[in-house]
Amino acid sequence: MSWIKRYRLRLYFHNSIWILPALSIPVALILVSQLIRYERAVGSHINMSPETARAIMGMVAASTFTMVVLVASAVLVAIQLASAQLTPRIIALIYRDPYRKVAFSIFVLTFTFAVGVLVRIEDTVPKLAGYAAAYGFLLNLALFFLFIDSMGKTLRPSTASRAVGLAGREVIRAVYPSRLNEDSDLQPIRAIEGKQPRVVRNMVDGTVMAFDRKGLLTLAERAPCVIELVPEVGDFIAQGDPLFRIYQGGDELSETRLRDSVAIGGERTLDQDPLFSFRILVDIAAKALSPAINDPTTAVLMIDQIHHLLRDIGHRHLANGHEQDSTGRVRLVYRTPDWDDFVLLGTTEIRQYGRDSIQVQRRLRAMLKDLIATLPERRRPVLLRELALLSTMSRRAFADLDDQALAESSDLQGMGGSHSEIAENHRDAQLRSVGS
């Protein structure tokens, strides 16, 4: 199976909530069939009238089916609320939650199992199958309460931001596995020299979701040639746009195999796109700062996650965007976001939309100052520029000098934090007075 097929199957499985519940139906049918066959062989049955057993199994099946309907409705309502209150780009994380998939599957399995037992009740009532269906329903009842509790907590901004932050850390560490050293080579690759490159054009409209890095490197080694992937992961590319440029050979490379090394779909994913987690957090913060919602505290929660993501990625070696073969020759070239891209995405829009919020400006300032103090020297220029822009905006936004002073002090909580500059200065003054 080709890489593109494996990737699409894996992506579809991760983003689909119906697959496990659908598979649980034949599993339940096989299970009830084998269990009742065994019970009939050994003569196992309950001392209960068939009418009573049918009534109980009918109630179990009807109640479990009601749970299935309620769970499906709850998921749809959660998606609508998350899309309206947070951002539509967080919907994929709701579908990917493994707990919801497993819980939904257990509900469907129990319903199918109960129906299977119901239709097999004749003159005697199977003991093991009957107990399994009845106690399975009680287990589903407890699981249903946990499911509703989980769905309610999912819609909280703090829970959503934490989920995005954890997913962002995973993709950052996957794309940039190496830590940054002071002697790390961050120089860009030299321009590729040679005759006019062969251009492979895109055939479908969509967003670049991921690409097969190892597969493209292998193709370039075998050709041999240098392959350049033109769009960056996360870019939208239209039909007819350049997808690859082939340098220094590669005339026999199949365009189909090259195109099958890039996954293009309807929206961005977190698989190989470390910027996408920042995009989700910034979108939630921007919506919270809109005049219709006016919720700067939610924006501060998003800055908390952006802060730690920037600190994580600031200590990592950002790849130069090329892969070498066993002899050290560059064979694959692709675009990657640099440090400035992450900082600008994580700060610019929030700074603009939160220009009238002292809370947001103080939290942004605390983030920038902490990053300047904790990250290597080479990461500081763009942080210092953003800090200067934040100071300029604070002076423009607030005419009152006291408000300007508040906005130009940093606070990890936005407002009221014990680590704010004002609180620290007051504490230092108290310590000096005690010492004297």
Image (cartoon, rainbow, N blue to C red):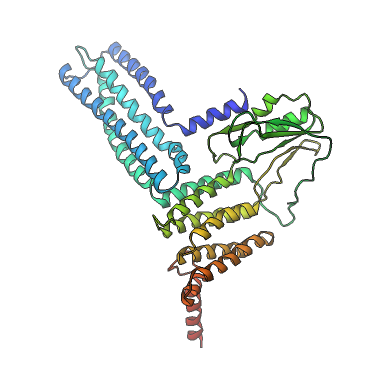
Could you tell me which residue is drawn at 49 percent across and 33 percent down? 14
Residue 54 spot, x, y in % from top left: 19, 19
Quarter holding the N terminus?
top right
Residue 296 spot, x, y in % from top left: 43, 60
257 or 411: nearer the viewer? 257
Residue 284 to residue 38: above or below: below
Could you tell me which residue is drawn at 34 percent across and 45 percent down? 152
Q: Is residue 128 visible?
A: no
201 or 320: nearer the viewer? 201
Residue 36 spot, x, y in % from top left: 30, 15
Could you tell me which residue is drawn at 78 percent across and 34 percent down? 197
**Residue 65 lies in quadrant:** top left
Q: Is residue 256 left or right of residue 40?
A: right
185 or 394: nearer the viewer? 394
**Residue 41 lies in quadrant:** top left
Could you tell me which residue is drawn at 30 percent across and 31 percent down? 69
Q: Farthest residue toward the right?
A: 194
Residue 75 spot, x, y in % from top left: 36, 37
Q: Can residue 157 be seen in this view?
A: yes
Q: How many marks?
A: 0
